[in-house]
Image: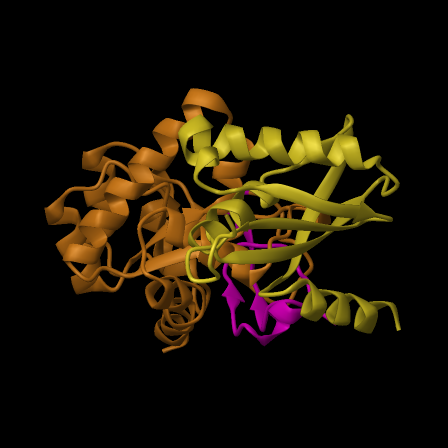
Amino acid sequence: MKVPPTEREKKRFIAFKIIGERKNFKKREVLLEVRRACLRLLGELGTSKTSLWLIDYKEGLGIVRCNTRSVDEVMCSLSTIIQLNKKNVRVEILGVFGTLRTLKGFLNGIHR
Amino acid sequence: MNMHKNYKAIDLRGYPCGMYEKVYQVYKYREEKPDYEYLGVELSTNDLREIGKLKKTPIFVRGGTEEKNRRILENKRVSVLSSPYPVNHFQAKLASKNGTAFEINVSEIVRAHGYARAILMEKLQKTIRVARKYHSPILITSGATSELEVKSPRVLVAFGKILGLEYYEAKACIYNVPKLILLKVKG
């Protein structure tokens, strides 16, 4: 049975940029590090409440999805990433968006 | 183009970047002064006697024990108490009377790992709980020492929120409180 729109979980999309010695990481590497950072800061129970998902990562720009209740927790977890594949990096949060369309519009604005 | 530029913020202990209105760099009292426009000084408790020599600059003092914290907070010229734990109700009252802010340094949390991070966050949460009750000023700083440690103002607000502050309070901690401290320092 289809879940009615009012029963669905509200989502937020967080755009981030990886700045550092290297940018061309694989999506898998970024995914593992995001998960690890979240587990380290929030623990297993805390992470279970975030509905965390890495949607895309390409050329230093990434998108993470979470629910509306845990935007701050996920942002903090992302900003605790200081090393990725033994390279020093910084994760800069670009913004929080309600839909993928607005996020992609924002990213297109960056590239222009 | 960055969304977070819309946030008005002053970082009293950070690394110069375009995301903040003003960024202060903090150096230790007996060490060499960096060549930068906005500077703050970090004193040790033994150097508190020489506080009169420092004028028109925010003064940071690192806390430790309850006794040490009380001695620091009794001095009206101290602007910020760094590592503000353990803090009790008496110290919180003193801080709100003298206008001394408790500093939450985000880089301390980022650098710590495992159980040490859990303990640190627990202590900061306790400090925030007491400070909120007695209306003592709280200051959130990035504590960055290099370009790779810079945090955006929105992230500082998020850290404030996960430590127990409300959104509007966390926003005040990155703009209104530093502004008041700078006004107090400059007389």
Between A34 and B26, the one nearer to me in the picture: A34
| Chain seen in yellow | A
Q: Quadrant of residue B79?
A: bottom left
Q: Where is residue B58 in the image (x, y as percent from the top left)?
A: 43, 62
Residue for point 84% across, 48% down: A58
* Left or right for B40, reference A110: left
Q: In which quarter of the image is the C terminus of chain B?
A: bottom left
Q: Is residue B186 left or right of residue A108?
A: left
Residue B78 in the image, given as x and y percentages of width and height: 32, 56
| Quadrant of image for the N terminus of chain B | bottom right
Q: Could you tell me residue A44's position as x and y percent? A: 45, 27
**Up-down relation of residue A33 to residue B106 (above or below):** above
Q: Nearer the viewer, residue A82 or A13?
A: A13
Q: What stretch is highlighted in magenta?
A: B1-30
B150 is higher (above) or lower (below) than A37: below
What colouring style does the render use? by chain
Q: Judge from the rendering whether residue B6 lies leftward or rightward of residue B40; answer left or right.
A: right
> Is residue B5 a member of the stretch shown in magenta?
yes
B25 falls in the magenta region: yes
Q: In x, y percent, where is residue A30?
A: 74, 36
Toward the front, the furthest residue is A1
Task: Residue B60: tell me if it is visible.
Answer: no
Specify the chain shown as orange: B
Q: Which one is nearer the viewer's eye here, A67 or B29?
A: A67
